[in-house]
Each structure stands twice: as structure tokens, then as C-alpha cells.
Image: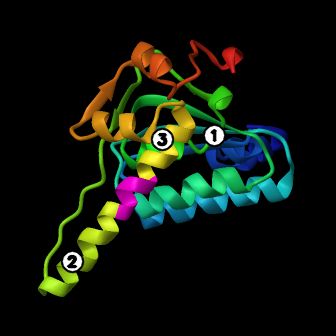
Amino acid sequence: MSKDEKKKDKDFSVDKLVFENRLVTIVGQIDDKLAKATSERLLALAAVSDDPIKVFISSPGGHVESGDMVHDIIKFIKPEVTCIGAGWVASAGALIFIGADKKNRVCLPNTRFLLHQPSGGVGGKVSDIEIQATQIKLMKERFEKLFAEATGQTPEKIAEDTRRDFWLDTKEAIEYGLLDRVIQSADDI
């Protein structure tokens, strides 16, 4: 291997390539660690330039407040963010997905979406259970408002549809207002 080939090989790194191409991936359970890493990457990319950022999402969901953090950072930073669904975009993953403007919410052909009302386990003293139940109710109302604004549906329609698991394929997601379009390749973005 020549000296130039060794240098080129040494300089190659997937992380570097992903960063230089302004890509972010969110895969798996949404938790505080994933939210921290994703938010740091978004903020770092925004600090480097105002060029658009692409966020790929395939997630079963997870912790709502962690999803809130990423959702809010997407809205906070100056660069335009395109969210690209792949596989499945569920629960807190869908919350992150709607952080992008509707025209920037796209997915690959086999993506499925899942919306549902927040859930949580409660325990402890009666007074603590009351506080937790109130917080879950407030979270549910906020969720319905955010998804209503993102889709054009009413909060009441979101509440009705998400009483139980609400699955959407790509066609249904477009009709519902969750998704702008299905893409086949990177050239479609």
C-alpha cells in the first residue's frame, strides 16, 4: 500500500463521512442517551454551517421527554432539517419526525408509522399517583396539540385515533398529513 493510500485509509471514518454529509441517524429506543447524542450532533452540525441536515429515523419510540428534546432541537436550529422515516417511526420516534416541517417529512417505501397516547407506570402514595396521573394527562393534551398542528387534524381527532395503537402505512400517513411523500432514492430529497 502506498503512502497516499495509507493516509487516505487512515483519514476514512464512517463518523467523519456521516458528519461531513450532514446526516444524523436515530435508530432504536428513544432514551436520554440517544437524545443527548442526537441533540449534540444536530447542534454541532448547525454550528458548522446553515446547510440542510438529513435525519434518518427508525424507532419503536421510548421516553417522551427524550423525544421532546430532539423534536425541539430540530425546530430550534437554523439549518433546514429533513426527517426520513425508514422501517418504522413509532411513538416518541413519530414525535421527533414531526419536528421537521411537513414538506421535509419523507420516508422510504416500506416505512410504517405508529401513534398512540402516552402511557406510564405509576406507583407510590396516593398523592404521588395523583400527581403522576395529572402529568400524563397534560402530556397527552400536549401530544394531541403537537400532532394536530403537524398534520392538520384536530386535537379531538388525534385523541380519538390514538386511544389505541394507530398504525399507518405510507399512503395513510400521507392522507393523514403526517407524511409529505415517499421517496425511492437520495435523489428524491
Labelled disc at residue 147: 3
Q: Position of residue 38 (x, y in %)?
A: 57, 56
Q: Is residue 185 visible?
A: yes
Q: Is residue 63 visible?
A: no
N-terminal label among 1 and 3: 1
N-terminal label among 3 and 2: 2
Q: Position of residue 45 (x, y in %)?
A: 76, 53
Q: Is residue 156 above or below residue 30?
A: above
Mark pair 2, 1: CA separation: 34 Å
Q: Which element is circle 1 on?
A: loop
Q: Name the kind of residue labelled 2 in the image.
A: Glu
Q: Residue at x 79, y 46 (%)?
A: 79
Please name whichever residue, 184 or 15, is drawn nearer the observer in this view of the structure.
Answer: 184
Q: Residue at x 64, y 57 (%)?
A: 73
Q: Is residue 30 above or below residue 148?
A: below
Q: Residue at x 70, y 48 (%)?
A: 16
Q: Residue at x 73, y 42 (%)?
A: 22
Left or right: 187 as drawn, with respect to 141: right
Stretch of the chain drawn in magenta: 138-142
Disc tally is 3
Q: Which element is circle 3 on?
A: helix
Q: Name the kind of residue labelled 3 in the image.
A: Phe
Mark 3 crowdedness (10 Å alpha carbons): few <14, some 14-19, many ≥20: many
Labelled disc at residue 53: none
Left or right: 128 as drawn, with respect to 19: left
Callout 3 touching callout 2 (CB < 8 Å): no
The residue wearing badge 2 is: 130
Q: Is residue 141 magenta?
A: yes
Q: Name the kind of residue labelled 1 in the image.
A: Ala
Please state which of the two labelled residues, at mark 1 or mark 3, is closer to the viewer.
3
